[in-house]
Every structure is written in C-alpha cells, then in structure tokens.
Amino acid sequence: MTQIYLVPGFFGFNEIGSLNYFNRVSEVLGEALAAHAVQAEIIETDTLPTGSIRRRALRLLDTVCARGGLEQDHLHFVGHSTGGLDVRMLLTPGVRLRDTGEDAEISARTRTAVTLSTPHYGTPLANFFTSLNGRNLLYLLTLLATSVPGRYSLYLGSRLLLTAVKLHRAVGRQENLLDAFTDKVLARLKPARGDDLWQFVQEISRDQGAMVQLTPEALDLFNGAARDRESVRYVSFVSASPPPNLASFVFKRRDLFEAFTHLVYAASYTIAGREHSQYPYPTPPEDTMSMIRGALPFPPGPGTSDGVVPTLSQIWGRLGGVALGDHLDVVGQFHHASRGKAYSPWVKSGSGFNEERFRRLWGEIAGAIAESQTEGGPK
C-alpha cells in the first residue's frame, strides 16, 4: 500500500472552520495519480503553526504512526513551505525525534520527498518576524485571542463584519476574500476558548520557535546538519510571482479590500527580496536556471519570490517544476469556481494563477511520485 502525506507550512493548519489549507489538492492530486495508475491514500496533516522545525517534524512522525504508515510499502511526502523542512528533518539519517526508532522505519519506507515553495536557504521575512515590530504584532494577536475581553471584542467585531458583508452582497458587489473568510470562519466563530480559531492562535502564542529557524542564518546551520537520505528521491517545485508595481495597485483600487491585500503583498514581496549579504542563495546549475527562466515572463534573480519565499531559496535536490503563482496560490488558495461557488484568494498578487496552472503543478508532482513509485531509488 502507498500513502502520501501533505504537510502544511508556516502558520499552517489542516482545517479552521470549513477553511482548508490544501484546498482541493487531495482531489486534483488523486486524479493525476490515477492517470499514472498509482493508487494511494492521500493524508492532509495537521501541524504546529509556528512551532520549531523539530517539534513540527515530531508531530509529523506521530501522525504517520497514527495513520498506519509503519505498515505501508511506500510512503511519499509533499511539504509546502516550512512543511518541506519538517519532511527533511524527519528523513535525516541519524535523527532521533523519538528513542523508539519509528523515524528510521518511516525513512526506510519513504520513496519521495517533494518540497513546494520551501525556504531551504531561509527567507528574509523571518528576520522581520524576529524584529521588534514583528514580535509586537504577534503579541497583540495572541493577547486578543487568549484573554476573555479580547475574544469577546473580536467576536463582537466579527458579528459587525458579517453584517457589513451582507450589505456588500445586497448592493451586488463582487465577492472577495472577506466574504469567503466570514462564511468559512467568522460565521462559525464562538467566544469560547475551545473554538478552532482561538486554539490556532493560542498555539502560536505557546511556541514561535520557527520564527528564528527560518532566517537565512539559521537555515545555514540546518543545512549543515540535515543530510539527505540516499534511498529517498528529493524533488523541489518552486514558485514565483510578478513583482508589484503602481499599475497593479491602481488596477485593484476598485475594491478597497483587494487594494489592501495587494499592499500587503507588495510589502511582503519587498522584504522577501532582500537577499542576505553574508548568506546568499547558491547559484543553481545552468540547466536549472534555464528551466526557471523559461517558465517566467520576467527575469528571475535573488529578489524574485512568491511573495513569501525567494525563488532561489526553494531549490533542493532535483528541480521538478516551476509555478507562476504566489505562495498560497500553489496550495489551492487562488480565485476559481468550485462546486458552483466562487473561491477568493488570500492575497491579490496579480499572478494570474488559474485552474490550468493548478492542475499542471499537481500533475507534475504526481508524476514525480509515480516515477519514484515505479522505478524506485533516488536520482
């Protein structure tokens, strides 16, 4: 039997309310695998949203054991963003996440480690979150969610927001992320501590170890210790989105919320593009760079990113494919229609990511898994 584990990234989750991290990925990946005559159980895992990579890898280990991974013939992992680092740590030869030895058994059964939009050499955004401004932002968020007055204030605010969204729809305005978020999360929000959203934020307040570990300086140390396992095929898929500009912002000002999310994207893209002077990204082989250049309508460089992770930081092992899309587009958080209902992205990046690109990307990932499944061994 074969199992494929989908591992979420930084700030990741499985589901909050009816909001799903890997939106439609299991469905599309399953269809693509069937076309390769591969039958597999696809498992979307939960994680610690901002916990240390070691603790996240331990959570992944426990999930694999709980889902019967030790009884499977073949295991494959697909890690998005920080999830790719969790996978690499789990599979590192000699790592001891538990003294009972399950990590070695899991590694022996693993055929493929796919990383998608993973900061293998860090992201400058992590340096921002470890700064005073970033820490204060997270402190404010956790204070609101972990105190009774804070939760009730946010709960009452969510009720007002729901009313505003209903008025927005009544005048015939186009739905955006705010509508989707209110439907999937805020409409189900309760002030009790046990609500999914509060538990998620409380977990962030308890452990923020990955904040430091995703900096270029910390990933330099991680890469020195986390060696590849010879029996596993490592394949990376990278993402890149267009740099923001004044014209793209003016185009989005027709919707205030879209304009705001585009400003967030512009700020994030700018910070992510600041390559560390002492820890530059390795120069990829020419055939790899040629593949990246051929997939993008703009010249790639150290400042190119998907809005969160620099593109040149995402390469590890064999390059399996390049996606023209932002960091969340690639896990299904893009504008599309599903089951007769429009789905809005988290951020308006202007990448133009669509259903065709989504299916092509996960079809290529399915192809990488199928190749390992049938041929066996790393390449």
Image (cartoon, helix red, strand yellow):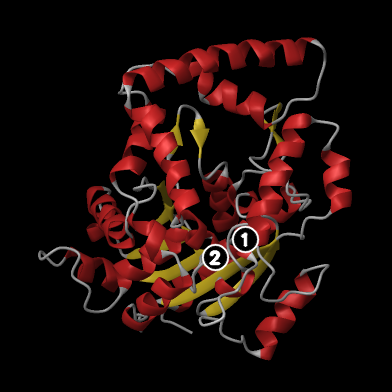
In terms of image quadrants, where is residue 46? top left
Q: Residues within 10 Å of mark 1 (few under 14, many from 20)?
A: many
Looking at the image, which residue is at 78% across and 68% down?
Answer: 296
Residue 271 is tagged as 1
The image shows residue 286, relative to residue 147, as above or below, that is: below
Measuring from the top left, give residue 328's x and y in whole percent. 60, 50
Residue labelled with disc 2: 124
Looking at the image, which residue is at 56% across and 44% down?
Answer: 27
Measuring from the top left, give residue 94's x and y in whole percent. 21, 78
* Image side of residue 297 versus residue 187, left or right: right
Cβ atoms under marks 1 and 2 closer than 8 Å: yes
- Judged from the image, the secondary structure of the residue bearing numbered disc 2 is helix
Q: Can see residue 249?
A: yes
The image shows residue 97, relative to residue 334, as above or below, that is: below
Q: Nearer the viewer, residue 377 or 79?
A: 79
Q: Residue furthest bottom?
A: 286
Q: Can see residue 9?
A: no
Amino acid at the residue labelled 1: Ile
* Image side of residue 289 versus residue 150, left or right: right
The mark that comes first in sequence, 1 or 2, is: 2
In terms of image quadrants, where is residue 151? top left
Q: Residues within 10 Å of mark 2 (few under 14, many from 20)?
A: many
**Gap in Å between the C-alphas at discs 1 and 2?**
6 Å
Q: Tally the marks.
A: 2
* Image side of residue 211 versus residue 73, left or right: right
The image shows residue 147, relative to residue 351, as above or below, that is: above
Measuring from the top left, give residue 108's x and y in whole percent. 27, 73
